Amino acid sequence: MDAGIHHASVEYRLLKHAPFPASHDDAVRALQFIRSKANEWGIDKSKVAAYGGSAGAQLVAYLAWGDDFANPKSEDPVARESTRLVAVAPLAGQSNMDLNWWVDHIPGCKRAFHPGSDSAIDRSGVEARALVKELSIITHISPDDPPTYMNYGMNPNDSIPEDHKRARGWSIHHINFGLVMEERLQSAGVDVYLNYPKANLPFESDVEFLMHHLKK
């Protein structure tokens, strides 16, 4: 607020409350609702950015890199609002929702980390595979995506923790997810910054990055 920036914390349904893509639908609707209140709340709807960690990273990247979910022909004024962002900061996010990819590309990741999973990351069938692709944020990257700042808590060559619980969280938020997204974003010509403990970036934090783009 001291910087002249509004801040909203968005809640969404967890898997135990509703299956995918309920959380993504919630994020889309929340962003549209905020924009629908722009005049009432004194918001510049042309300057909206987002950040989130882990599952939240999935959701903000889905908004930033996906097509605009606005429906100009809708009778619902909220649904007519844009979902595009001027900048995004997915923190410790997963590039895709394919559990097989996780096991193959993330050191120490095991299917046993997700026993009995009924989420999109462990489904089979044509419809399920289509859902996995839709929710895998890396598949939505395109040249018109906004500047992106990603952050991970480990270096690329760090060893997996010995503790089982820590190893599970470490693998779910592994920097290899960020590395493949950085490569895809760079190939698309998107301005991207990948932060980790030994990285040297022009922005010290996601907050500094987002404020830079919001105050342009």
Image (cartoon, grey):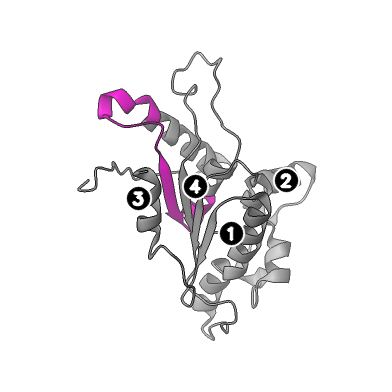
Q: CA distance from mark 4 to mark 1?
A: 12 Å
Viewer can see residue 141:
yes
Give the residue drawn at x 53%, y 83%: 161
Q: CA distance from mark 3 to mark 2?
A: 38 Å
Which of marks 2 and 1 precedes in the sequence?
1
Give the residue drawn at x 38%, y 63%: 205
4 and 3 marks in contact (CB < 8 Å): no
Can you identify the residue that label 3 sits on?
211
Q: Quadrant of residue 173?
A: bottom right
Query: Where is 40 relative to 160, above or below?
Result: above
For the C terminus, give its image quadrant: top left
**From the viewer's perspective, is 192 left or right of 203?**
right
Q: CA distance from mark 1 to mark 2?
A: 18 Å
- Counting the numbered discs, the total is 4
Between label 4 and label 3, give the one nearer the viewer. 3
**From the viewer's perspective, is 112 left or right of 215?**
right
Can you identify the residue that label 2 sits on?
128
Q: Which mark is residue 94?
A: 1
Mark 2 secondary-structure assignment: helix
Mark 3 secondary-structure assignment: helix
Mark 4 secondary-structure assignment: helix
Which of marks 2 and 3 precedes in the sequence?
2
The range drawn in magenta is: 35-58
Q: CA distance from mark 4 to mark 3?
A: 16 Å
Check if residue 48 falls in the magenta segment. yes
Which of marks 1 and 3 precedes in the sequence?
1
Viewer can see residue 117:
no
3 and 1 marks in contact (CB < 8 Å): no
Q: Nearer the viewer, residue 30 or 1?
A: 1
Residue type, label 1: Gln
Image coordinates for residue 55, horizontal then vertical, percent: 50, 54
